[in-house]
Image (spheres, rainbow, N blue to C red):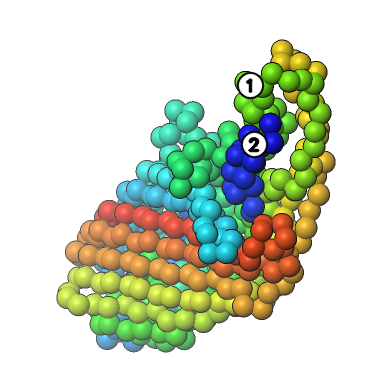
């Protein structure tokens, strides 16, 4: 029995050391085009006067696109990763790739979009994410609320459990210092056109929170122990196992600075790349553990499992950080445009003081990426 436990439990410990979505993604975007504001009544005049405002940029470097309205079709891709690294050995988990197909409509850069994940419609996924975005030349940000599951081990291509989930919220903001010549909306909401190459130092504040549960409930433990003792001849069984990590909670507030650049190598063509590393001003990571008591009088009786939950908070570490990267490629005509972009967030959190639990020096790394391909038409 001990022999089997030594084989099975390291796998559990390895993975457990630690909405509306691309399935049903609603995205509300505000990306002012800085059109001339005029007084007037009604929603569209309110958009021009309050949200859009007046022109305040160098017209040699950027311009307004043709038309006031735009409609777009898009395809979205999203994935979440978690890595536990102990003494240089990585134990990675990730959820299966989420995809969605959507449509968006905007007026002078103020728009709303809706996407549907067909796997969810077929009942093969329960993931959900909500995106809210506001981009201007000077400042802006986005909010992402997610509830995803279906995590699996990428080394052995095996499921962790059948009930795991990652829930959380991420809020990002930015300020572009060279906002007279450099346009963030040109790269991500397409409500501006970058005419000449320009870059800008950027600064940003970010908040992140998540709750990871690995899906280890009483039924899961009962199945594991049944498999362990399936071919054993001796009964009864009565034992306990301590410190089986069943999930964790992470939150932080970060402040950082970086650089963004819009490269215009040819007319109607633009490439954007930006990088913003940040230090964690406030951070907290709480590891949740189970103490498992299990018993069975004979081979024909299901296991009785009782769990007692406890938690340990990782000490603060000064050099924990997060890094946001964005890449975008745009080609546009007078009335149409084709774009593709990818955004990536990576946070690194050291876990000092918990070496005795993991059997060595341990760090936690979270990585989320989102890609989008869009075809749009202006009128």
Q: Nearer the viewer, residue 100 or 84?
A: 84
* Vertical relation: 156 (above or below) 89: above
Q: Which mark is residue 34?
A: none
Judge from the rendering whether residue 105 lies leftward or rightward of residue 297; answer left or right. left
In the image, residue 270 above or below residue 296: below
Quarter the N terminus occupies: top right
Q: CA distance from mark 2 to mark 1?
A: 13 Å
Query: At x 72% / y 60%, what residue is drawn?
Result: 356
Residue 294 left/right relative to 17: right
Residue 296 sits in quarter: top right
Mark 1: give few (<14), some (14-19) or many (20+) Cα within 10 Å.
few
Could one spot residue 157 in this view of the protein?
yes
Q: Nearer the viewer, mark 2 or mark 1?
A: 2
The x, y position of residue 222, in whole percent, is 70, 27
State the residue position of label 2: 3
User: Observer-nearest residue: 348 or 302?
Assistant: 302
Residue 230: which numbered mark, if any?
Answer: 1
Q: Is residue 139 above or below residue 99?
A: below
Q: Is residue 25 visible?
A: no
Image quadrant occupied by the C terminus: bottom left
Q: Earlier in the sequence, mark 2 or mark 1?
A: 2
User: Where is residue 96 drawn, in percent x and y?
Assistant: 45, 43
Give me the residue at 58% from left, 73% from top: 321
Secondary structure state at the residue bearing disc 1: loop
Instruction: Please state which of residues 44 and 311 is positioned toward the viewer in this rendering.
Output: 311
Farthest left residue in view: 266
């Amino acid at each position: 029995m001990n022999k089997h436990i030594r084989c099975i439990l390291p796998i559990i410990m390895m993975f457990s050391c630690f909405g509306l979505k691309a399935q049903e993604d609603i995205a509300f975007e505000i990306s002012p085009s800085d059109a001339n504001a005029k007084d007037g009544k009604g929603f569209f005049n309110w958009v021009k006067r309050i949200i859009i405002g007046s022109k305040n940029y160098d017209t040699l470097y950027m311009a307004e696109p043709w038309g006031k309205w735009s409609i777009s079709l898009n395809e979205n891709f999203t994935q979440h990763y978690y890595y536990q690294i102990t003494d240089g050995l990585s134990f990675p988990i990730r959820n299966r790739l989420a995809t969605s197909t959507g449509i968006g409509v905007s007026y002078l850069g103020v728009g709303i979009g809706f996407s549907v994940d067909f796997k969810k419609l077929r009942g093969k996924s329960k993931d959900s994410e909500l995106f809210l975005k506001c981009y201007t030349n000077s400042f802006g940000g986005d909010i992402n609320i997610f509830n995803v599951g279906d995590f699996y081990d990428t080394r052995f291509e095996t499921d962790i459990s059948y009930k795991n989930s990652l829930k959380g919220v991420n809020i990002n903001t930015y300020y572009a210092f060279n906002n007279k010549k450099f346009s963030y909306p040109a790269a991500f909401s397409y409500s501006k056109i970058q005419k000449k190459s320009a870059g800008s130092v950027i600064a940003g504040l970010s908040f992140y929170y998540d709750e990871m549960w690995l899906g280890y409930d009483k039924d899961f433990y009962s199945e594991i122990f049944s498999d362990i003792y399936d071919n054993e001849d001796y009964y009864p069984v009565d034992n306990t196992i301590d410190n089986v990590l069943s999930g964790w909670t992470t939150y932080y507030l970060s402040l950082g600075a970086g650089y963004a650049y819009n490269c215009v190598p040819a007319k109607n063509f633009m490439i954007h790349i930006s990088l913003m590393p940040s230090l964690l001003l406030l951070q907290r990571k709480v590891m949740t553990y189970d103490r498992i008591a299990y018993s069975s009088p004979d081979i024909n009786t299901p296991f009785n499992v009782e769990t007692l939950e406890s938690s340990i908070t990782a000490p603060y570490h000064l050099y924990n950080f997060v890094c946001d990267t964005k890449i975008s490629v745009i080609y546009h005509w007078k009335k149409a445009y084709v774009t593709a972009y990818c955004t990536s967030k990576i946070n690194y959190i050291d876990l000092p003081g918990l070496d005795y639990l993991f059997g060595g020096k341990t760090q936690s790394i979270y990585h989320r990426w989102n890609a989008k391909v869009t075809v749009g038409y202006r009128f």
